[in-house]
Amino acid sequence: MRAVPARLLPSWAWVTTLTVGAVAAVAVLAVRADDGPKPVAGAARPSASASAQPHPAPSAPPAVPDGSGTGRRVVYSLAQHRLWLVDASDSPRRTFPVWAGTVSPDPGNYTVSTRRESTTGSDGVQIEHIVYFAAKSGVSIAFSNAVDGSSPPPPAAGTRTGGIRMRAADGAALWTFATPGTTVAVVS
């Protein structure tokens, strides 16, 4: 018995077959999608009195807390875990959230005493832009940011830390703004 040589299809035939199959699959899916639920024309545009919007308008940044003084200053809200950099005309230049240490300063006015470019924090993390402004019960209190931009790990039970951390970009902005002698107003 003699073997019959197999015929190979040309590549254009394979491409054509695969293309026709793909177009057919897309057509079937399109017909199925067309059979699904359709939006009601009146629901396409929410009324002005709609209580929930799919994309809420961005909210304004929080206002500088009342009772934080006047003039150029850094404002630190203990309750909001937030800083404001306020210029001489009482306009907030920047505001951002912070992570507080376990020892917080008492409400009141302080002055930036010293600054340090970088060191290792009490949690072993490399920090930079350290701005010292207070001390409480033997613990120095300062603003800083982790060099790698991370948030601080939860402190070990009983650990006393006075570091108030922020994101790296916020730390750089604070470093530029809070030169020695700058007022730091701490509010509840």
Image (cartoon, rainbow, N blue to C red):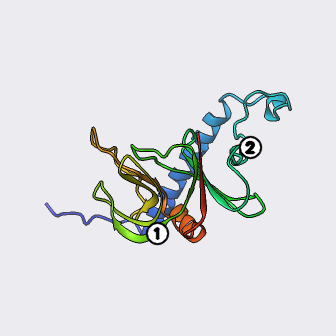
Residue 57: mark: 2
Task: Give the amino acid type for the residue marked by disc 2 in the picture.
Answer: Ala
The residue at the point 51 percent across, 61 percent down is 16
The residue at the point 71 percent across, 46 percent down is 63
Mark 2 burial class by Cα count in 10 Å: few <14, some 14-19, many 20+: few
The residue at the point 71 percent across, 44 percent down is 59
Task: Give the amino acid type for the residue marked by disc 1 in the picture.
Answer: Arg
Callout 1: helix, strand or loop? strand
Query: Front-most of 82 and 21?
Result: 82
Would you say the residues marked 1 and 2 are in contact, meaning their CB atoms lie under 8 Å apart? no
Residue 103 image point, x, y percent: 41, 44
Asked if residue 8 is positioned above or below residue 60 in the image, the reply reads below
Residue 84 image point, x, y percent: 63, 54
Q: Residue 8, located in which quarter of the rendered image?
A: bottom left
Query: Front-most of 97 and 5?
Result: 97
Residue sitting farthest toward the left: 1
Mark 1 burial class by Cα count in 10 Å: few <14, some 14-19, many 20+: some
On-image quarter of the C terminus = top right
The numbered mark, 1 or 2, whose residue comes first in the sequence reads 2
Q: Nearer the viewer, mark 1 or mark 2?
A: 1
Residue 172: mark: none
Residue 115: mark: 1
Asked if residue 40 is positioned above or below residue 78 in the image, the reply reads above
Residue 136 image point, x, y percent: 42, 48
On-image quarter of the N terminus = bottom left
Report whether 132 appears left or right of 7. Answer: right
